[in-house]
Amino acid sequence: MSQQQPVGRREDASPWAFAGMIGLAAAFFLFAATPTVVDCPWWVVVLLILFWLVALVQGCRWFTRRPVAVLVLAVSLALGWFAVVMAGARWLDWV
């Protein structure tokens, strides 16, 4: 007679996935605060938030299957935000 493990096994919950979700939450605040950092058009903020929503859905899908990828996704979002803000300030005069 074999015993089955419960559905929510301890090895399913990786700390990397939780760190990635915390990073996604921090990225949301970066994206939402973009108008206070630079004088960008409203549609840029809308596009950033939509991009964040897509990343959040993907992060939820990857939570148990690819936990390190959730963290990489959060770091990529933050770096992407920085690139957008710097490019806009440099070439589009979002000062």
Image (cartoon, rainbow, N blue to C red):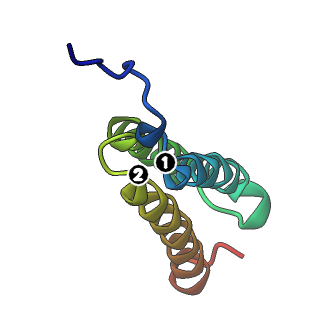
The answer to whether marks 1 and 2 mark residues whose Cβ atoms lie closer than 8 Å is: yes
Identify the residue position indicated by label 2 in the image. 67
Give the camera-side residue of 94 and 11.
Answer: 11
How many C-alpha atoms fall within 10 Å of the one at disc 2: few (<14), some, or many (≥20)? many
**Looking at the image, which residue is at 39% across and 18% down?**
6
Residue type, mark 1 in image: Ser
> Residue visible at 29% across and 19% down?
4
Give the farthest residue toward the top: 1
Depth check: give the residue in front, 25 or 29: 25
**Secondary element at tag 1:** loop
Q: Position of residue 51 (x, y in %)?
A: 42, 47
Q: Tell me the kind of residue under disc 2.
A: Pro
Residue at the (43%, 65%) spot, across then down: 72
**Where, by quadrant of the figure, is residue 93 drawn?**
bottom right
Report the Cα–Cα distance between label 1 and label 2: 6 Å
The circle drawn on residue 4 is none
Local SS, label 2? helix
Is 57 rendered above or below residue 47? above
Q: Is residue 47 left or right of residue 85?
A: left
How far across and down, in percent of the image, does residue 46 sit? 52, 43
Quarter of the picture containing the C terminus is: bottom right
In the rendered view, tell whether residue 80 sits above or below residue 31. Answer: below
Q: Quadrant of the N terminus?
A: top left
Question: Of label 1 and label 2, which has the lower sequence position?
Answer: 1
Q: Residues within 10 Å of mark 1 (few under 14, many from 20)?
A: some
Q: Quadrant of residue 90?
A: bottom right
Extreme-left residue of the structure:
1
Residue located beneath label 1 in the image: 14
- In the image, taking residue 66 as reference, residue 40 lies left or right, namely right
Q: Position of residue 27 (x, y in %)?
A: 61, 54
